[in-house]
């Protein structure tokens, strides 16, 4: 991500650092912030008060803390029975902090205390929120905070009332469950206080639809949501005038809608007669289950039918959806919708022989194209290498189940075929690394450890290669 720094002075940035160095430092701070949050969560979940029957092992506490901070949802112990209310509270706080961004939370605290943001803080917050203009960071952060709390509150109220009236839960348990699942859903975490996730609610639209709505809205990304909100405030129906939308918003919302429709249709057709999933449901129940299952691979992690009972073809299709993931600067993971659609336009332009990649009469910058290719290829490598290592070092689990878990961890999805808890401890640590990498993103993590920041003052001679 590029930041425009108009002639920064050494006194303003704390030393004689180049703009390239300043662009790299926020990524390092964000990485350190996430590591600190994971370490804190690991310590808290290791306390005797956090677990019900026995103390959590180091791997169990680390895995759960990483999964919560990285808003993944993969678990090695049952959230409902293993953790006490204290442990569940730690998890939900980690989810909220991880979803909103550790550095965004830190910047907000500083903003509330000082009522202003310095250049260094803005750089860190811009890296966390993917805001293009430094001048927009303050508005993005405050708007994101208000929208997050409002959306979670609405979903929590709906779920609480439904659990009380239809399932006979006590007001206290219903309220806690409603708040927990609202935060987990909006942040695309997938943690559930029910051992079967949403399976018991598979045909209940009053539970599934609010959770799906929270997942979709949280996964679209704050920049898109705030842009639409500002257009709505401007009046005159501007929010419905697509020509006023930015290219990013049009592509993100449009691609998200297409993927949701395609996913719902594919799940409906593939699982219609499966006796272990959609088979026993009536037609409205099948449609609701298909829509829910189509939403969740967008890195949410809830499941309303047993994932391990899905057809092999449905598993593979879910792999693809998880790998694509959610919107940029959203609470979800994956290579992101923006990356996917940019690559699609690059391929289309290349097939047509166009010299430029154009979308809605605008050229896509070559730096954006290179970033999309980089993210996608790093994502492929991040999935392929661990899958190979885990496959050749175990004979218990099949390739398709291991691949599913690896993609779910990298894409911070949280869907599981049920083998996570049975993996060897060092395989679980591989998933921990993948969740961390998937949450930060390959470019952010790579920039945070880069040793080289200067710009080259020369270019090598050009050459050509035979492709294909």
Image (tube, rainbow, N blue to C red):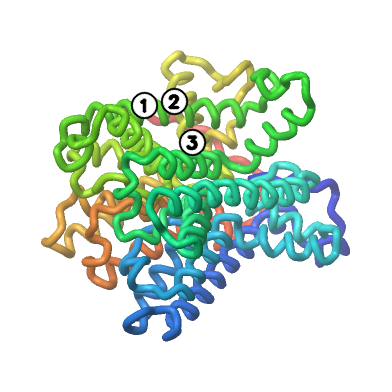
Task: Depth check: give the residue in front, 35 or 71.
Answer: 71
Q: CA distance from mark 1 to mark 3?
A: 14 Å
- Name the residue at 40% across, 68% down: 64
Q: CA distance from mark 2 to mark 3?
A: 11 Å
Q: Are marks 1 and 3 in contact (CB under 8 Å)?
A: no
Instruction: From the viewer's perspective, tell me whether residue 153 is left or right of residue 280.
Output: right
Question: Is residue 176 something that shows in the picture?
Answer: yes
Verify CB contact (< 8 Å) between mark 2 and mark 1: yes
Q: Which numbered disc, 2 or 3, marks the residue closer to the eye?
A: 2
Tell me if mark 2 has few (under 14), some (14-19) or many (20+) residues whose alpha carbon lies within 10 angstroms of its own. Answer: few
Q: Nearer the viewer, residue 458 or 276?
A: 276
State the quadrant of the C terminus: top left
Please state the horizontal and vertical placement of residue 179, each as a whole percent of the image: 52, 57
Residue depth check, mark 1 versus mark 3: number of the one nearer the observer: 1
In the rendered image, which residue does mark 1 sit on? 262
Residue annotated with mark 3: 337
Visible in this render: residue 129? no
Q: Residue 280 location in percent, x, y?
A: 18, 37
Q: Residue furthest left?
A: 395
Side of 125 where 435 appears, left or right: left
Q: Is residue 272 left or right of residue 345?
A: left
Identify the residue at image location x=27%, y=72%.
Answer: 425
Using the image, determine if residue 141 lies above or below residue 285. below
Disc 3 is placed on an element classified as helix
Mark with earlier residue (1, 3): 1
In percent of the image, x 59 and y 26: which residue is there?
A: 250
Q: Quadrant of the N terminus?
A: top right
Across and down, in percent, residue 334 comes to 44, 45
Position of residue 114 measured from the top left corner of the image (x, y, whole percent): 85, 64
Q: Which residue is mark 2?
A: 258
**Distance between mark 2 and mark 1 Cα atoms:** 6 Å
């Amino acid at each position: 991500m590029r930041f425009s720094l108009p002639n920064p002075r050494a006194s303003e940035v704390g030393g004689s650092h180049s703009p390239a160095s300043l662009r790299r430092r926020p990524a390092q701070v964000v990485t350190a912030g996430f590591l600190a949050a994971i370490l804190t969560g690991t310590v808290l979940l290791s306390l005797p008060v956090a677990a019900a029957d026995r103390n959590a092992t180091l791997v169990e506490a680390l895995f759960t803390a990483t999964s919560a901070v990285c808003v993944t949802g993969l678990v090695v112990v049952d959230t409902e029975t293993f953790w006490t209310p204290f442990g569940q509270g730690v998890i939900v706080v980690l989810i909220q902090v991880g979803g909103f961004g550790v550095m965004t939370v830190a910047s907000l605290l500083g903003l509330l205390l000082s009522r202003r943001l310095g250049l260094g803080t803005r750089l860190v917050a811009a890296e966390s929120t993917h805001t293009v203009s430094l001048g927009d960071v303050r508005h993005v952060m405050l708007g994101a905070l208000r929208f997050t709390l409002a959306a979670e509150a609405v979903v929590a109220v709906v779920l609480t009332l439904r659990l009380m009236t239809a399932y006979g839960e006590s007001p206290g348990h219903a309220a806690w469950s409603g708040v927990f699942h609202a935060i987990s859903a909006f942040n695309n975490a997938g943690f559930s206080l029910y051992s079967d996730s949403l399976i018991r609610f598979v045909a209940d639209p009053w539970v599934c639809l609010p959770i799906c709505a929270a997942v979709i809205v949280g996964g679209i990304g704050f920049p898109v949501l705030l842009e639409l909100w500002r257009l709505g405030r401007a009046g005159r129906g501007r929010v419905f005038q697509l020509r006023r939308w930015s290219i990013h918003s049009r592509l993100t919302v449009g691609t998200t809608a297409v993927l949701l429709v395609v996913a719902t249709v594919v799940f409906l057709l593939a699982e219609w007669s499966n006796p272990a999933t959609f088979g026993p449901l009536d037609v409205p129940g099948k449609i609701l289950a298909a829509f829910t299952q189509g939403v969740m691979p967008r890195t949410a992690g809830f499941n309303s039918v047993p994932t391990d009972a899905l057809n092999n073809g449905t598993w593979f299709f879910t792999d693809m959806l998880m790998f694509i993931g959610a919107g940029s600067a959203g609470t979800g993971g994956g290579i992101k919708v923006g990356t996917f659609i940019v690559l699609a336009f690059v391929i289309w332009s290349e097939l047509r022989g166009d010299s430029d990649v154009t979308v809605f009469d605008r050229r896509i910058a070559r730096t954006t194209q290179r970033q999309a290719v980089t993210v996608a290829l790093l994502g492929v490598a991040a999935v392929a290498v661990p899958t190979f290592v885990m496959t050749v070092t175990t004979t218990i689990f099949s390739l398709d189940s291991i691949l599913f878990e690896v993609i779910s961890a990298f894409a911070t999805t949280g869907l599981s075929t049920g083998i996570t808890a049975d993996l060897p401890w060092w395989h679980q640590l591989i998933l921990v690394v993948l969740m961390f990498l998937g949450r930060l993103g390959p470019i952010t993590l790579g920039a945070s450890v880069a040793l080289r920041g200067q710009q080259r003052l020369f270019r090598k001679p050009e050459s050509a290669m035979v492709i294909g």
